[in-house]
């Protein structure tokens, strides 16, 4: 039996929010099924429009993860992106600046020089290897619920991430996998009216991996909040 890593557990919300980060390097150790079920039970408390709870979750483990990982990498190399929900048309102003800063922090942490497009492309492909995570969760919504179903799923994804971190499980939300919606639909045998929102790769963090050594900043609330009296 694989020994479960002993990791810090966070029990208060501020601690969870301040210490959670996106993991981009995982250990091979699987997360026990009972721990995953605890995460799912907590995530199920997510609020949604009219309590519709539109999310459905497909989770891999063991050989299922390996088959998915191998097939996804092959699909990405030979197929165009076809997300169910359009990706951003552009990143304007501060949004582009924040995106670039995050990328530069990641590249710097793993030793990729500015302008090295081959190395940055190779790093991007690690998304489709799930950063070596032992599990991936695919989150889908009902087509008829439209954008608000997707918004509710976004809330679910955040709750999942926080719940996982509170139990010592590392995770990373990945919109990149949603670009391969046709492959995901085939692999998981998803009905045509289920639309892929996002994926979450999860497991136990490899604390020695350089990609896990940086932290992104958050904007001051004064830049995002307008008070009306």
Image (cartoon, rainbow, N blue to C red):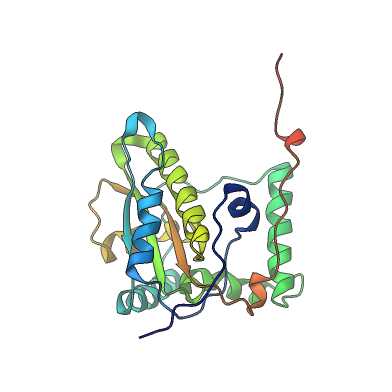
**Image quarter for residue 225?**
top right
**Image quarter for residue 76?**
bottom left
Residue that protrudes farthest toward the bottom in the picture: 1
Is residue 137 rendered to the left or right of residue 5?
left
126 w.r.t. 80: above or below: below
Locate the N terminus by quadrant. bottom left
Locate the C terminus by quadrant. top right
Is residue 124 rendered to the left or right of residue 147?
right
Residue drawn 58% across the image and 54% down it:
16
223 w.r.t. 204: above or below: above
Task: Where is residue 137? Give x, y as percent.
Answer: 38, 61
Task: Where is residue 111? Give x, y as percent.
Answer: 73, 78
Residue drawn 46% across the image and 45% down it:
154
Task: Where is residue 27? Give x, y as percent.
Answer: 51, 79
Q: How many marks?
A: 0
Is residue 17 rendered to the left or right of residue 228?
left
Residue drawn 77% across the image and 70% down it:
114
Task: Where is residue 138? Give x, y as percent.
Answer: 37, 58
27 w.r.t. 51: above or below: below
Residue that protrudes farthest toward the top in the picture: 229
Foreground residue among 36 and 210: 36
Foreground residue among 49 and 46: 46
Residue drawn 56% across the image and 58% down it:
10
Q: Is residue 191 visible?
A: yes
Q: Can residue 81 be seen in this view?
A: no
């Amino acid at each position: 039996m694989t020994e479960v890593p002993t990791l810090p557990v966070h029990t208060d919300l501020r601690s969870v929010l301040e210490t959670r980060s996106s993991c981009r390097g995982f250990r091979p150790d699987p997360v026990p099924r009972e721990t995953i079920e605890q995460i799912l039970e907590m995530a199920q408390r997510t609020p949604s429009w009219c309590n519709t709870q539109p999310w459905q979750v497909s989770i891999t483990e063991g050989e299922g993860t390996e088959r998915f990982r191998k097939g996804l990498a092959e699909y990405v190399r030979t197929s165009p992106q076809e997300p169910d929900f359009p990706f951003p048309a552009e990143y304007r102003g501060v949004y582009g600046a924040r995106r670039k800063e995050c990328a530069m922090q990641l590249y710097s942490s793993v030793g990729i020089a500015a302008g090295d497009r081959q190395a940055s492309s190779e790093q991007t492909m690690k998304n489709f290897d799930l950063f070596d995570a032992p599990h991936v969760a695919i989150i889908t919504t009902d087509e008829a619920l439209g954008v608000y179903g997707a918004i509710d799923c976004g809330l679910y994804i955040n709750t999942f991430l926080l719940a996982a971190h509170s139990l010592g499980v590392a995770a990373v939300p990945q919109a990149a996998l949603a670009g391969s919606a046709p492959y995901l639909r085939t692999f998981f045998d998803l009905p045509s009216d289920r639309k892929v929102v996002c994926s979450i790769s999860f497991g136990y963090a490899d604390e020695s991996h350089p990609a896990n050594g940086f932290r992104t900043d958050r904007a001051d609330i004064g830049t995002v909040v307008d008070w009306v009296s």
